[in-house]
Image (spheres, rainbow, N blue to C red):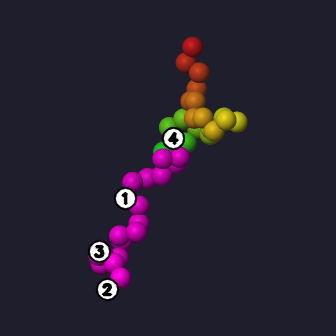
Amino acid sequence: MDEVDVNPGVHRPTEPDEEQVLGELYGEPDAYGVFRGEDTR
């Protein structure tokens, strides 16, 4: 037995990727890699 957890889904992520979530919320990051969203001023 090589692994403690024998569940076949043990290596699948349980949460979405942070970069994917930020992109959905704020759009593409700027040149510095910062997710800024739209200007609300």
Residue 7: image location, x then y, percent = 30, 75
Residue type at the position of mark 3: Asp
Residue at 55%, 18% in the rendered image: 40
Instruction: Give residue 5's mark.
Output: 3
| Mark 3 crowd level (few <14, some 14–19, many ≥20, 10 Å Cα) | few
Query: Which of disc 4 and disc 2 is earlier in sequence?
Result: 2
Which residue position is annotated with label 2?
A: 1
What's the magenta region? Answer: 1-20
Which residue position is annotated with label 1?
A: 14
Residue 39: image location, x then y, percent = 59, 21
> Mark 2 near mark 4, Cβ–Cβ under 8 Å?
no
> Mark 2 near mark 3, Cβ–Cβ under 8 Å?
no
Q: Nearer the viewer, residue 6 or 29?
A: 6
Q: What element carries label 2?
A: loop
Q: Is mark 3 on a helix, strand or loop?
A: loop
Residue type at the position of mark 1: Thr
Residue type at the position of mark 2: Met
Q: Main secondary structure of the magenta part?
A: loop
Residue type at the position of mark 4: Leu
